[in-house]
């Protein structure tokens, strides 16, 4: 059996994810080592992610270790991985997806609607902020950075009335005590790829690819390819007000997507069905651009996204 080296971020959740993959590999008889790598996103802890604007901030240094052959594979939260990865690398496996939805966490209130007027809600995600403000314009949204433990500790210390997190991370870490509401995707559309793990390798490394092929889940891959195709069509990274969730329904892919102004003043929602994940993602993305998504995203990116011509 092979000796495989995994590159991982050092957060509690990233380590859980990497240990999860390493346990599955060891179960196949492989010898596994892990190298913890500090990324740009881990070093910038006092600025809202949306203001940093660096694509690949949680992956760049890990990919450098891959390129240098210090590690053989990298485990990422798929939503952190840019939609366009370098030709040097490939996503060899996308694991079976955990719950992709966002959750409302609070020690005092049972749901978003239960929050009092002008309540303090913590999130550093423009996507979550925009959809929250559309639902409750009176809420005060405040930045929230740090690992899962840090965020929950800030909530319990009373710095926030509530915080919004991904269901997947809390479930993986077994920290579900403060979840009060699982937010339906039609209320808060999750990030593209949320809840899925991506295993990245060097392009052409057929040996490593063969060893990890068993980790790949066809349904999760099709759904997340669709979501990432939409994100790519809209020119988005992981810190933009774009949501996407694809699921198999009646044998076809169904995609729900949203583009929202950060202040919640305008929320565009589109959906579609299809059998080709990339074509579906791009067509729903085109529909959002035609309806005014370009203007919203131009305000965020500071440059125009080319809206497709009317059919």
Image (cartoon, rainbow, N blue to C red):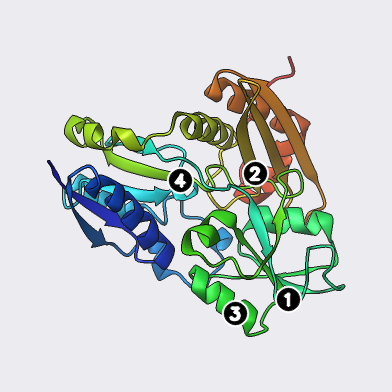
Please give the residue where the numbered disc 2 appears in the rendered image.
243
Q: Find the residue positioned furthest to the bottom.
A: 157
Q: Position of residue 91 (x, y in %)?
A: 35, 36
Is disc 3 in contact with disc 2, using a CB cutoff of under 8 Å? no
Whole-percent x and y of residue 163? 66, 68
Closer to us: mark 2 or mark 1?
1
Of the image marks 3 and 4, the number of the one nearer the N terminus: 4
The residue sitting at 28% across, 37% down in the picture is 212
Pick whichever of labels 4 and 2 is earlier in the sequence: 4
As drawn, is 255 to the left or to the right of 151? right
Q: Residues within 10 Å of mark 4 (few under 14, many from 20)?
A: many
- Tag 3 near tag 4, CB within 8 Å: no
Q: Choose between 130 and 106: the one closer to the eye.
A: 106
Numbered disc 4: secondary structure: helix
Disc 3, SS: helix
Residue 168 sits in quarter: bottom right
> Between disc 2 and disc 1, whose residue precedes?
1
Q: CA distance from mark 4 to mark 1?
A: 29 Å
Query: Is residue 292 toward the left or the right of residue 282 in the image?
Result: right
Q: Which mark is residue 78?
A: 4
Tag 2 secondary structure:
strand
Image coordinates of residue 267 in percent, x first then y, are 78, 45
Q: CA distance from mark 3 to mark 4?
A: 26 Å
* Residue under pointer 3: 154
Q: Earlier in the sequence, mark 3 or mark 2?
A: 3
Residue 242 placement: quadrant = top right
Q: What residue did someone put label 1 on?
A: 161
Residue at 66% from the left image edge and 28% from the top image edge: 254
Separation of marks 1 and 3 at Cα, in angstroms: 10 Å
């Amino acid at each position: 059996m092979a000796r495989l080296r995994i590159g991982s971020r050092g957060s509690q959740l990233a380590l859980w994810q990497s240990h999860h993959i390493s346990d599955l590999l060891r179960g196949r008889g492989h010898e596994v080592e892990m190298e913890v790598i500090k990324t740009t996103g881990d070093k910038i802890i006092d600025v809202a992610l949306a203001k940093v604007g660096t694509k690949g901030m949680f992956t760049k240094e890990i990919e450098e270790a891959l390129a240098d052959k210090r590690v053989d594979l990298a485990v990422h939260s798929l939503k952190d991985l840019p939609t366009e990865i370098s030709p040097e690398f490939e996503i060899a496996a996308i694991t079976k997806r955990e719950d992709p939805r966002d959750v409302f966490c609070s020690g005092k209130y049972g749901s978003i609607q239960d929050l009092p007027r002008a309540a303090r809600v913590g999130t550093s995600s423009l996507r979550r902020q925009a959809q929250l403000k559309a639902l409750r314009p009176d809420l005060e949204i405040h930045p929230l950075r740090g690992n899962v433990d840090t965020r929950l500790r800030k909530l319990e210390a009373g710095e926030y009335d509530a915080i919004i997190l991904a269901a997947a991370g809390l479930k993986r870490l077994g920290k579900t005590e403060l979840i009060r509401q699982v937010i339906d995707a039609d209320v808060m559309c999750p990030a593209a790829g949320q809840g899925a793990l991506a295993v990245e390798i060097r392009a052409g490394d057929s040996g490593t690819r063969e060893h990890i092929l068993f980790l790949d889940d066809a349904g999760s891959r099709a759904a997340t390819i669709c979501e990432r195709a939409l994100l790519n069509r809209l020119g988005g990274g992981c810190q933009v007000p774009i949501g996407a969730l694809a699921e198999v329904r009646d044998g076809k892919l169904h995609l729900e997507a949203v583009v929202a102004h950060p202040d919640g003043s305008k929320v565009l929602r589109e959906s579609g069905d299809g059998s080709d994940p990339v074509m579906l993602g791009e067509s729903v993305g085109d529909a959002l651009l035609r309806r005014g998504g370009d203007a919203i995203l131009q305000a965020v990116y500071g440059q125009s996204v080319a809206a497709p011509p009317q059919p």
